Amino acid sequence: MTAEQLQQGWTPRRVGRRVVTLSEIDSTNTTALDALAEPNADGLAVLADFQASGRGRQGRSWLSPRCASVLCSVALVQPQGQTHWPEARMGGYLTLVTAVATCEAVRSATEVTPTIKWPNDLLVDGKKLAGILVESRLTGDSGRGWVLGIGINCLQHIGHFPPELQEAATSLELAVSHGVDRLGVARQLLQALDVWLAEEPDEGKVHDAWSLFAEPLGRRVRLRRDGQEFTGRTVEVDPAGGLVLQCDDGRREWFDPMLTTAM
Ligand code: BTN
């Protein structure tokens, strides 16, 4: 996969103006976070065929065989003059945008439409197809930079997943009846992110799009926050990505998408 192939046939406005493709790296998120210190980091996309230390949420590892997945991280630096949102709100917003763009990309490149499980797992037939890890770092000029990390399982067969994940994980290859074009999925991903992120943030628009792909509300879920578990029914997801849960013990609780794990 080369930068030229990924940029072919469209003109990036923000995401994908600079693309770096690597055959192997520790983590594309680490590379993109480090790049935030550079002057032209905004919109940089880093893609790798293999990660030696891919990171998932909550300190977990993200494993993928060589050339089997789209492993992509996008660096964003808040443009000067753009409304400066609180860190938590921006993190939630970017989590929703990334989930929507990833669903759109998968739908455009294949016949599959994933479902979003709050906050940011993409499922097909109830199994995990893709994961998203949004991270941030202070930049030199006291601003904040963000990295959107996306891993999409493309070409894995069931034996590629560790035994304990074989029931819970899937890939596009397992989900569709025709061959999967990993480059096409990656290109669509950059394009979809660019469409959303080249515009001023619009929480309402993103929230509406997110709701179309999301699991229906009213489902029973189990969440973990600060080492504590909560069970109950989902009530709503607000425009900043927070989830309101009607807990089994009668309380209503609000959950930050950046600080909560769905189990
Ligand atoms: C999760 O579901 O736990 C999030 C997984 C995110 C994985 C991607 S792969 C590309 C990028 N680089 C990383 O090290 N992690 C993210």
Image (cartoon, rainbow, N blue to C red):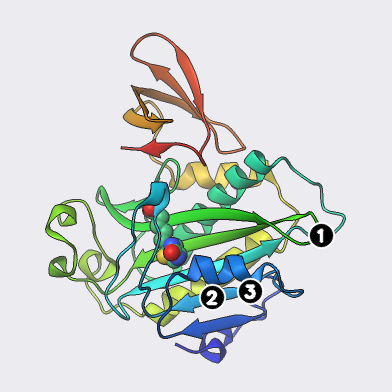
Q: Quadrant of ligand 1?
A: bottom left
Residue that badge 3 annotates:
44
Drawn side of residue 246 relative to residue 3, left or right: left
Viewer-nearest residue: 83 or 144: 144
- Answer with mark 1 or mark 3, whichever residue precedes in sequence: 3
Going by the numbered disc 1, the residue's amino acid type is: Asp
Up/down of 13 relative to 200, above or below: below
Q: Secondary structure at mark 3?
A: loop
Residue 105 locus on image (x, y percent): 47, 66
Q: Secondary structure at mark 2?
A: strand
- Residue shown at the point (44%, 11%) measured from the top left: 251
How many other residues sit within 10 Å of disc 3, few (<14), some (14-19) or many (≥20)? many
Residue contact between numbered discs 1 and 2, judged by CB atoms under 8 Å? no
Residue contact between numbered discs 2 and 3, judged by CB atoms under 8 Å? yes
- Residue shown at the point (50%, 89%) measured from the top left: 2
Residue 113 locus on image (x, y percent): 37, 57
- Foreground mark, 1 or 2, reads 1
Residue that badge 1 annotates:
141
Residue that badge 2 annotates:
46
